[in-house]
Image (cartoon, grey):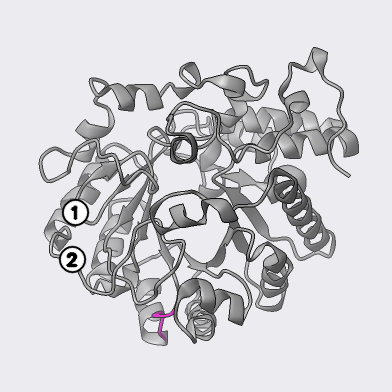
């Protein structure tokens, strides 16, 4: 997760994280990525059931409830375990998490245990009553997925009317006093819709948006040939930075982040080297604190049936099941060779990743994408859009990036 507004617009300084000692237990939510202890932020896909049919769903969501979902009691035991190891955030996802009737009970219990509870949803089921209930239990944030304007979004979501229902959900959450953000997965069919999302932020006074790079997992595997080219990705990144800066300069700052491609960090730094070298130095310090991709270390995932994964895209590999062992035991069990390697992945990446100047700030980028594209878990991530010149050691590099 790369904070465009934090880094490019200077809304966070290195001293902000240092002031809290960089311990996740004491950091406010917007600084958690700079923690030194990297307690896992946990995505819990509490159900595989969904009311939509998204073509890029990493979870292969289904219309019907599966028979192997964790029970409410098992979910609360899981939350007890996560709280005990200091996991700062639990993100309830799906399928569609709002389809589980006990979601308010589970999220409320997480809040009671001192965790920050957030929801990732398609927004179509957030009625005024549901929004008020989520506000009452102390929900911190709801991220609502929108893939463009009405026609584009509904095509991606597989259901006519999904866009309008999501807009209702946004307004209902806002009226209840819940912080709302947007989530947008970039690909070749909707990259031109990025300005539409920025317009929505401004028009609806939405404070946050996350732009997700496409990951080749679940039904998203079928879109591998529909990902952006490297040049297209660079243009979209420049557009996102430009629009973020415009809102900031207009006195309407928004929190803008990109997710699932840690080449974004060095790309921002290289642009700032041309525009504001002093800020570039501060950004490099923040990127080093962030450490890049944290799958299997600073982020983890639990499926609806209790399987533990390195992140929400790793569904093809489970490290164990919380019905048999607590998450805390599974997560820190270094006898599993893959778990151990993921916690030190910089030692194991190959090819241009192993020689990259930015390895310490990128962390080797997304291993799932590398495996899906090449069959080799440790091969270079094909979505890294930095040129060979840009990844060379500084002494051998001529800065020519950008426009």
Give the class, few, some or many, for how many residues have Cα within 10 Å of label 2's Cα (few <14, many ≥20). Answer: few
Return the disc, 2 or 1, that comes first in the chain's sequence: 2
**Is 375 placed left or right of 327 in the picture?**
right
Give the class, few, some or many, for how many residues have Cα within 10 Å of label 1's Cα (few <14, many ≥20). Answer: some
**Is 1 placed left or right of 367 in the picture?**
right
Can residue 294 be seen here? no
Q: Secondary structure at mark 2?
A: loop
Q: Is residue 26 above or below residue 237?
A: above
Can residue 327 be seen here? yes
In the image, the segment drawn in magenta is 123-127
**Is 30 placed left or right of 107 in the picture?**
right
Asked whether 400 falls inside the magenta stretch, the response is no
Q: Secondary structure at mark 1?
A: loop
Query: Main SS of the magenta segment?
Result: loop
Are the two marked residues, 2 and 1, in contact with CB atoms closer than 8 angstroms? yes
- Which residue is disc 1 drawn over? 305
Q: Position of residue 196 (x, y in %)?
A: 70, 72
Tell me the distance, in whole angstroms, between the alpha carbons under discs 2 and 1.
9 Å
Q: Position of residue 127 (x, y in %)?
A: 40, 85
- Which residue is disc 2 drawn over? 66
């Amino acid at each position: 997760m790369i904070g465009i507004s934090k880094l490019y617009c200077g809304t966070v300084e290195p001293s902000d994280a240092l002031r809290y000692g960089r311990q996740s237990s004491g950091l406010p939510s917007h600084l958690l990525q700079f923690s030194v202890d990297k307690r896992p932020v946990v995505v819990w896909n509490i159900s595989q059931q969904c009311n939509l049919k998204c073509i890029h769903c990493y979870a292969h969501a289904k219309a019907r409830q599966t028979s192997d979902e964790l029970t409410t009691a098992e979910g609360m035991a899981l939350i007890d375990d996560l709280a005990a190891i200091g996991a700062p955030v639990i993100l309830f996802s799906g399928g569609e998490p709002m389809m589980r009737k006990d979601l308010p009970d589970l999220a409320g219990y997480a809040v009671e245990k001192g965790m920050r509870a957030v929801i990732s949803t398609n927004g179509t089921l957030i009625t005024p009553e549901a929004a008020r209930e989520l506000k009452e239990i102390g929900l911190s944030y709801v991220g609502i997925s929108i893939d463009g304007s009405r026609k584009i979004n509904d095509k991606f979501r597989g259901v006519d009317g999904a866009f309008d229902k999501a807009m209702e959900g946004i307004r209902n959450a806002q009226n209840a006093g819940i912080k709302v953000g947007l989530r947008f997965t970039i690909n070749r069919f909707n990259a031109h819709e990025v300005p539409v999302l920025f317009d929505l932020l401004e028009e609806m006074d939405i404070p946050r948006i996350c732009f997700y790079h496409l990951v080749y997992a679940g039904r998203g595997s079928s879109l591998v040939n529909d990902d952006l080219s490297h040049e297209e990705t660079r243009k979209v990144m420049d557009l996102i930075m430009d629009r973020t800066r415009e809102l900031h300069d207009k006195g309407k700052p928004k929190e803008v982040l990109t997710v699932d491609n840690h080449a974004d960090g060095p790309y921002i730094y290289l642009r700032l080297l041309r525009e504001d070298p002093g800020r570039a130095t501060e950004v490099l310090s923040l990127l080093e604190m962030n450490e890049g991709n944290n799958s299997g270390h600073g982020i983890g995932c639990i499926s609806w049936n209790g399987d533990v994964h390195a992140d929400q895209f790793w569904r093809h590999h489970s490290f164990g099941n919380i019905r048999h062992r607590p998450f805390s035991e599974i997560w820190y069990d270094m006898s599993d060779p893959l778990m151990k390697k993921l916690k030190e992945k910089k030692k194991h990446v190959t090819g241009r990743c192993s020689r990259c100047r930015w390895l310490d700030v990128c962390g080797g980028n997304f291993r799932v994408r590398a495996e899906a594209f090449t069959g080799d878990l440790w091969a270079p991530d094909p979505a890294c859009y930095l040129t060979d010149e840009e990844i060379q050691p500084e002494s051998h590099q001529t800065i020519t990036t950008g426009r």
